[in-house]
Image (spheres, rainbow, N blue to C red):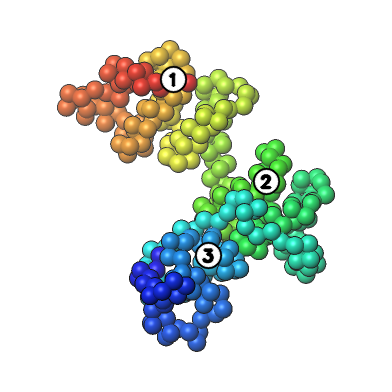
């Protein structure tokens, strides 16, 4: 956000700090657009600024950094979000799409990849959505192609789904192929652990429910729980309820996560300390009753 609130002496007037003049000679056209837009719309985000000024998100971020370095904008970053629905924002005309397909090798790569992986003739709206990702958002062609391949490998062959997935990854900071590869490696590791959990719990090959998938992703992906700790939560759950109850497992794991436990040893030490202090164990009768009363059922 700009570090000064804008005082407008009259409607339709934008006030810019005089200090900005020190950088006028070296500022690019994109940087000047960003300067004016952000002082006219101090609550805006990067995606909106890019959309309204006709530049890519990458250019908008660079321009914001330029003015932040010059001391015109505050140190904290504005929100980095772009639209997940292409119909809301830029819809490229057929002439622009045709010209970019002919002259831009990166965009050609994206279009060829989408057509091949989706196994269909792309529509004008398809081409426009892909150009939005490549041109407006500023995602490198290899990253867009990687997202397309990832989604198609999972049976998600909808370009609408692919679009939302790509924008979601970009908003999470995945804007280079190296970062995308790191994401794939993390994802593979999480899927491996989920596979071990499926076997442990006897889930077979059935598809996970949305709730189950969300919990498993949280345990292994967000909380970075080692498998042995999840196994311990499973054992405590079965011992207490005689069933596999993922909601109950989640309540145990959440407690451990909030206490900073990252190993079976941490849990043992923590429970030992609680017993010495006269507190209930995480798997004690009081905890079980409270969990059941709060509805930690599948």
Residue at horizontal 50 percent and vertical 36 percent from the top: 217
Residue at horizontal 46 percent and vertical 58 percent from the top: 79
The crowd level at tag 1 (other Cα within 10 Å; few <14, some 14-19, many 20+) is few
Give residue 220's position: percent from left, percent from top: 47, 37
Give residue 203's position: percent from left, percent from top: 57, 21
Residue farthest to the right?
Answer: 121
Give residue 249's position: percent from left, percent from top: 42, 25
For label 3, the SS is helix
Give the label, 2 or 3, closer to the camera: 3
Residue farthest to the front?
Answer: 10
Q: Which mark is residue 297?
A: 1
Q: Are marks 2 and 3 in contact (CB under 8 Å)?
A: no
Residue farthest to the top?
Answer: 242
- Quarter of the picture containing the N terminus is bottom left
Give the label, 1 or 2, closer to the camera: 2
Q: Which residue is under mark 2?
A: 160
How far is the residue under mark 3 from the one under mark 1? 45 Å
Report the label total: 3
Q: Is residue 40 in view from this perspective?
A: yes
Give the label, 3 or 1, closer to the camera: 3
Q: Which mark is residue 49?
A: 3
């Amino acid at each position: 956000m700009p570090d000064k609130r804008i005082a407008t002496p009259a409607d339709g007037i934008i006030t810019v700090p005089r200090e900005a003049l020190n950088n006028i000679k070296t500022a690019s056209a994109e940087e000047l657009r960003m300067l004016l837009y952000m002082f006219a719309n101090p609550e805006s985000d990067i995606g909106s600024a890019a959309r309204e000024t006709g530049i890519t998100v990458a250019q908008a971020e660079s321009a914001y950094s330029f003015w932040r370095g010059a001391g015109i904008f505050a140190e904290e970053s504005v929100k980095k979000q772009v639209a997940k629905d292409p119909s809301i924002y830029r819809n490229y005309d057929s002439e622009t799409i045709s010209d970019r397909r002919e002259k831009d090798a990166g965009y050609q790569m994206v279009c060829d990849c989408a057509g091949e992986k989706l196994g269909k003739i792309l529509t004008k709206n398809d081409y426009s959505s892909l150009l939005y990702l490549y041109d407006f958002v500023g995602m490198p062609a290899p990253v867009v192609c990687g997202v397309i391949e990832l989604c198609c490998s999972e049976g998600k062959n909808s370009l609408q789904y692919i679009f939302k997935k790509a924008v979601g990854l970009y908003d999470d900071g995945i804007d280079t192929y190296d970062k995308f590869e790191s994401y794939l490696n993390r994802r593979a590791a999480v899927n491996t652990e989920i596979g071990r959990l499926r076997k442990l719990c006897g889930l077979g090959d059935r598809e996970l429910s949305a709730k189950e998938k969300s919990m498993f992703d949280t345990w292994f992906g967000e909380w970075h729980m080692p498998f042995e700790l999840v196994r311990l939560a499973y054992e405590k759950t079965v011992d207490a309820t005689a069933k596999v109850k993922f909601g109950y497992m989640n309540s145990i794991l959440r407690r451990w996560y909030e206490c900073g436990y990252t190993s079976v040893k941490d849990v043992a030490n923590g429970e030992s300390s609680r017993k010495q202090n006269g507190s209930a164990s995480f798997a004690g009768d009081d905890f079980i009753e409270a969990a059941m009363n709060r509805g930690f059922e599948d």
